[in-house]
């Protein structure tokens, strides 16, 4: 089998004005994604998706990465990842046994590589006739899920989080910065409200999107301890691993992070600094299935659990399901509670989420079929996703 075509198609989903809300990231006016297709000479097509600026991702795939894949056998997925990652030195890298990356080893290029790797694993699993998680090596066929959202201001957090628990989730996550902005006192007020809403038996996690400095994060963490928080996510910038380790040493709350880290080398640095209890690689940034399973293995050797970050495109949520079903140290999977048609209306089949768990798809490959009008429904719109 040979790869005969590689296509990258930008998609957008405009958010209706009445659903646009301001958060610490700005006001989100649309969602973008790039759909990645890998076509083969036997008529099978693999589907992947990339994060990152669509115009840039499409150009990188079309000009830099597609030519390296054409004519290759998708069953050689490790080789294809190394080829994309090492660029012109992929042969010496494989001959000598150590990485020799070019200048595209992080950022948007890695997001493009990740999208292609997902598509390669999809088509490879279709050839094998099994779902991706079985091609990777299945460890389970369902995984505990958590409802992820929690932007409501002040005491409204009670009702919002109670709503997630009422859907059957035994764990829920809220944002440290609500729609009413940030102060330690306000976060504590919102957490108290959330606990009232969900009771004592539902787990509660908090996500700060890397927006705090170290001392504020430590002060907040200490005040949060009495509310039995299951993890404190991205308290500080992803560029400050020693600072994150300082926060971790200052609190009994487990620290989670990883959604904005690229490759196993970024995770190696996080682990080296003993900065994290729960690793949250995003398959679209970490480097696709090939790299994320290396990260999962590295984490497990250190007793670190895996909770894949899953956001944006339905392809990425579907891919994250397969990660969760194949990584032994994955204990929970994120299920977005935000307004996300590109996640929830991309496929013809619904996700199987019930009783607080996500269940694996049963058909070969990714296990979901793109809706027939996908390019009309999610026609690309130029411009930024967030307006500040
Ligand atoms: Mg997060």
Image (cartoon, rainbow, N blue to C red):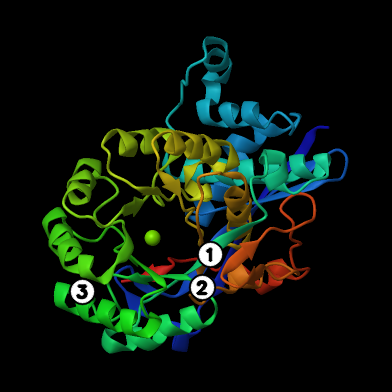
Q: Where residue 278 sits: x, y (%)?
A: 38, 50
- Cβ atoms at labels 1 and 2 below 8 Å apart: yes
Q: Quadrant of residue 128?
A: top right
Q: Residue at x 55, y 44 (%)?
A: 328
Give the label, 3 or 2, closer to the camera.
2
Look at mark 3 in the image and give the residue it sits on: 182
Q: In this image, 287 relative to 153: left or right?
A: right
Label drawn at residue 169: 2
Q: Residue at x 61, y 55 (%)?
A: 321
Numbered marks: total: 3
Q: Earlier in the sequence, mark 3 or mark 1?
A: 1
Q: In this image, 276 relative to 283: left or right?
A: left
Q: CA distance from mark 1 to mark 2?
A: 7 Å
In the image, 129 versus 195, the foreground residue is 195
Q: Quadrant of residue 118?
A: top right
Q: Is residue 85 above or below residue 322?
A: above
> What is the quadrant of the C terminus in the image?
bottom left
């Amino acid at each position: 089998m040979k790869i005969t075509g590689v296509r990258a198609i930008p998609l957008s989903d405009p958010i209706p004005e009445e659903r646009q809300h301001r958060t610490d990231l700005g006001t989100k006016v649309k969602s973008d994604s790039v759909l990645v297709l890998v076509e083969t000479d036997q008529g099978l097509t693999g589907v992947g998706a990339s994060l990152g600026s669509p115009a840039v991702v499409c150009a990188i795939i079309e000009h830099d990465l597609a030519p390296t894949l054409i004519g290759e056998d998708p069953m050689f997925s490790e080789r294809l990842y190394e080829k994309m990652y090492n660029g012109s030195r992929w042969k010496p890298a494989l001959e000598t046994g150590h990485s020799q990356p070019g200048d595209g080893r992080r950022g948007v290029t890695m997001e493009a590589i990740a999208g292609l790797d997902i598509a390669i694993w999809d088509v490879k699993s279709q050839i094998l006739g099994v779902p991706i998680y079985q091609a990777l090596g299945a460890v389970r066929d369902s995984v505990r899920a958590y409802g992820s959202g929690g932007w409501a201001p002040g005491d409204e957090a009670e009702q919002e989080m109670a709503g997630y628990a009422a859907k059957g989730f035994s764990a829920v996550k809220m944002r440290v910065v609500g729609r009413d902005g940030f102060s330690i006192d306000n976060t504590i007020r919102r957490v108290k409200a959330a606990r009232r809403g969900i009771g004592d038996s539902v787990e509660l996690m908090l996500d700060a999107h890397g927006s705090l400095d170290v001392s504020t994060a430590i002060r907040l963490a200490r005040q949060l301890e009495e509310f039995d928080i299951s993890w404190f996510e991205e308290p500080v910038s992803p560029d400050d691993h020693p600072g994150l380790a300082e926060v971790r040493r200052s609190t009994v709350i487990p620290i989670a992070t990883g959604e904005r880290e690229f490759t196993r080398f970024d995770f190696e640095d996080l682990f080296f600094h003993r900065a994290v209890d729960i690793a949250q690689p995003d398959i679209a940034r970490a480097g696709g299935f090939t790299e994320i399973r290396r990260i999962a293995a590295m984490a497990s050797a250190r007793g670190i659990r895996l909770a894949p970050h899953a956001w944006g495109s339905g392809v990425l949520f579907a891919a994250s399901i397969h990660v969760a079903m194949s990584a032994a140290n994955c204990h929970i999977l994120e299920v977005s509670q935000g307004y996300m048609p590109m996640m929830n209306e991309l496929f013809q089949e619904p996700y199987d989420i019930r009783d607080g768990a996500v269940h694996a798809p049963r058909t070969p490959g990714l296990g979901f079929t793109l809706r027939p009008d996908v390019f009309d429904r999610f026609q690309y719109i130029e411009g930024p996703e967030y307006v500040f």
